[in-house]
């Protein structure tokens, strides 16, 4: 097996004295969708933020074979890592097009033109609204814009923190379809989701997180049929 | 009061107000991008004005050397920060910005000093020198503490103001200086007569405001600055370095300060500490604009200029008192109108 694109090994993350994530290791290979499922407060957002460099961590994070544990956020972006954060963090008083253009801040102008093309094909809705201020978009449109902005930088790995949060079922299925298309286009995805059923359906590999630790991992199809998981995360959805 | 005096006062007020508008806009910009309340803005005015006056007198201003020394310190900081990953490219970039740039300016200053340079040459050289100082000031004093609270940044800002004012005294002495006017032409329309210098003030102010607007709306770096002001984390997530935005903001602020100084120094004698008072008036306008609004700041600055002109006519002893008293009702109104805000920490 080739070396993974992202390798997180033995990571601990604390807020002051409280350890929110304990001894977590995870791999994402090229062209793979990996999902982390877990209850509220399990530490999923904390983990993604630390991988992006927003929070400090103890342990090691390598990306594309390079140790980036001491990198700034901006250097991680330059290396090809991108995060769509839980709160989206759009530029609310700027329009859709400017938001997207800034997503391509680090890449050459010619490549940026292609990225625009690609993002508008994935989300035609954004093209219609390109002169509208980001802060006035609907929740679903904001989520599309957040993903679009992240994709503008042509990342190798896209981390999504609950992309379906607060969205109507039809938009959720749109978003998940898009995630699938990304893999086909050569972008790996690390997906954190409350909607475990949908996440497990498109993912290749899954980790289950409880109280700051990974308690289970394996191919997504196996996790989806694991009795413990079905009972805790999928139970009511099957009922 | 007759019409001639009235028109004269209005004209005077607008000329000063235009300068305060430029300074107020710079303060709003710097605060939005870096959360620094830029007290040393006035020192940029002084440095610009006195550097220009010194160059016009055929001497080498101390500010050129200051820029070079600050460059060396900034280079040291960059090297220290990059010690874990010493990429050749990074070092080369740091060397170009921190060493090559200020020393090239210094060399140019020595080469040109003593000759009879034209006004544009002296202006350009003064702007370069002060811009370099502004850039390095951010790099040295603010970038290392960029993540701290507004209060800590303010304290650092006051410290920078005091230090720069002290250096100003060393470089330029306690006597005031005047510089040659950009234009000696005069224009008379009916009862109004405009000096070439005040026309230059209007023209350059308007050009700068239009230029800033174009920069912020149409260039990638302008948008990146706005993005940093709107959402710092969002900006970092697309790879815009907070330090780059901060340096850009300080570069613009120092340029604006220096331009203002060069525009004023032919009209009034400037001393090493005059800039502070001028900067404070821009500050009042910026406060009236809530440190957020560019248009309110610009209008308020014109108001400050007018109040100042009329109070210097009616009660010249109380001129400054009246101008600075303006801020009290504004603060009272603002504190009543403003919702409770929590300080952003990141
Ligand atoms: N800034 C903070 N300071 C202190 N504790 C925090 C902070 N942020 C998160 N926590 C705690 O860390 C734990 C993990 O939080 P995190 O946001 O990572 O959970 P999550 O798995 O993303 O949950 P959700 O599914 O609700 O988004 C929680 O117990 C939370 O209360
Ligand atoms: Mg979360």
Image (cartoon, coloured by chain):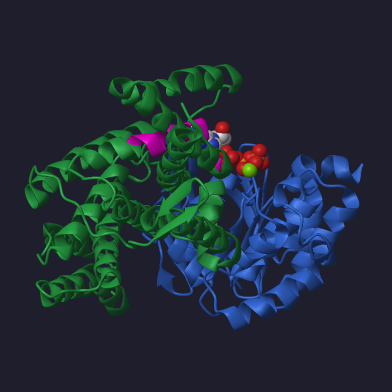
Direction from residue A236 to residue B56 in the image, left or right:
left
Chain B is shown in which shade?
Answer: green
Query: Where residue B335 appears, x then y in whole percent?
Result: 53, 19
Nearer to me, B21 or A71: B21
Question: Quick one: quadrant of the N terminus of chain A?
Answer: bottom right
Instruction: Give the main secondary structure, helix, strand or loop, of the magenta stretch.
Output: helix
The foreground one among B98 and B185 is B185
Above or below residue B342? Residue B279 is below
The reply, left or right, for residue A99 in relation to residue A170 is left
Residue at x-position 77% and y-position 72%: A181
Bounds of the magenta span?
B280-293
Q: Colour of chain A?
A: blue
- Is B226 contained in the magenta span? no
Q: Is residue B285 magenta?
A: yes
Judge left or right: residue A64 versus residue A189.
left
Q: Residue at x 9, y 65 (%)?
A: B59
Q: Which residue does the image show at 72% across and 52% down from the upper left?
A: A133
The x and y percentages for residue B39 are 31, 39
**Residue appearing at x 56%, y 60% in the figure:** B223
Q: Quadrant of residue A179?
A: bottom right
Q: Is residue A134 visible?
A: yes
> Where residue B66 sits: x, y (%)?
14, 58
Q: Quadrant of the C terminus of chain A?
A: top right
Q: Nearer the viewer, residue B231 or B260?
A: B260
Residue A162, position as x, y percentages in the image: 70, 49
Report whether A31 appears left or right of A126.
Answer: left
Location of residue B325 (image quadrant): top left
| Residue B113 higher or lower than B294, as above or below | below
**Res A18 seen here:** no
| Residue at the extreme bottom | A110
Ligand 1, seen in the image, is in the quarter at top right
């Amino acid at each position: 097996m080739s070396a993974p694109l992202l390798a997180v090994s033995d990571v601990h993350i604390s807020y002051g004295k409280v350890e929110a994530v304990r001894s977590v290791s995870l791999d994402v290979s090229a062209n793979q969708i990996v999902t982390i499922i877990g209850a509220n407060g399990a530490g999923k957002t904390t983990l993604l933020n630390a991988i992006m460099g927003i929070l400090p961590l103890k342990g090691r994070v390598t990306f594309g074979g390079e140790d980036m544990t001491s990198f700034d956020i901006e250097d991680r972006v330059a290396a090809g890592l991108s995060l769509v954060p839980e709160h989206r963090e759009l530029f609310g008083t700027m329009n859709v097009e400017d938001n997207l253009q800034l997503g391509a801040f680090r890449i050459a102008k010619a490549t940026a033109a292609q990225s625009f093309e690609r993002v508008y094909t994935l989300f035609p809705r954004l093209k219609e609204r390109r002169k509208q201020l980001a802060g006035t978009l609907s929740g679903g449109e904001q989520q599309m814009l957040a993903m679009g902005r992240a994709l503008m930088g042509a990342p190798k790995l896209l981390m999504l923190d609950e992309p379906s949060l607060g969205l109507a079922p039809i938009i959720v299925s749109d978003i998940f379809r898009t995630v699938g298309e990304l893999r086909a286009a050569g972008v790996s995805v690390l997906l954190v989701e409350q909607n475990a059923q949908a996440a497990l359906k498109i993912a290749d590999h899954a980790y289950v997180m409880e109280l700051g630790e990974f308690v289970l991992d394996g191919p997504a199809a196996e996790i989806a049929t694991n009795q413990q998981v079905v009972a805790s995360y999928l139970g009511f959805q099957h009922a | 009061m007759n019409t001639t005096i009235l028109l004269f006062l209005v004209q005077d007020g607008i000329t000063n107000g235009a300068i305060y508008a430029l300074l107020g806009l710079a303060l709003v910009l710097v605060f939005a991008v870096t959360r620094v309340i830029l007290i040393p803005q006035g020192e940029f005015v002084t440095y610009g004005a006195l550097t220009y006056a010194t160059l016009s007198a055929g001497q080498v201003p101390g500010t050129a050397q200051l820029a070079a020394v600050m460059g060396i310190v900034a280079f040291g900081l960059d090297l220290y920060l990059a010690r874990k990953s010493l990429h050749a490219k990074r070092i080369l970039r740091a060397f170009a910005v921190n060493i090559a740039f200020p020393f090239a300016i210094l060399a140019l200053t020595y080469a040109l000093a003593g000759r009879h340079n034209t006004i544009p040459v002296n202006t350009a050289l003064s702007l370069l020198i002060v811009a370099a100082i502004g850039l390095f000031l951010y790099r040295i004093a603010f970038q290392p503490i960029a993540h701290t609270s507004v209060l800590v940044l303010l304290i650092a800002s006051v410290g920078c103001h005091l230090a720069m004012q002290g250096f100003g005294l060393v470089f330029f002495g306690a006597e005031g200086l005047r510089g040659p006017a950009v234009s000696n032409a005069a224009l008379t329309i009916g009862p109004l007569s405009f000096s070439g210098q005040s026309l230059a003030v209007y023209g350059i102010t308007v050009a700068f405001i239009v230029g800033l607007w174009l920069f912020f709306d149409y260039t990638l770096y302008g948008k990146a600055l706005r993005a940093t002001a709107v959402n710092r984390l969002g900006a970092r997530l697309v790879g815009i370095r907070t330090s780059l935005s901060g340096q850009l903001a300080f570069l613009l602020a120092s340029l604006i300060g220096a331009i203002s100084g060069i525009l004023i120094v032919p009209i009034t004698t400037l001393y090493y500490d005059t800039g502070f008072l001028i900067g404070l008036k821009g500050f009042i306008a910026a406060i009236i604009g809530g440190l957020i609004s560019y248009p309110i700041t610009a209008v308020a600055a014109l108001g400050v200029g007018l109040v100042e002109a009329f109070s210097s006519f009616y009660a010249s002893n109380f001129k400054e008192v009246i101008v600075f008293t303006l801020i009290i009702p504004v603060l009272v109104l603002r504190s009543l109108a403003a919702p409770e805000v929590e300080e952003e920490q990141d």
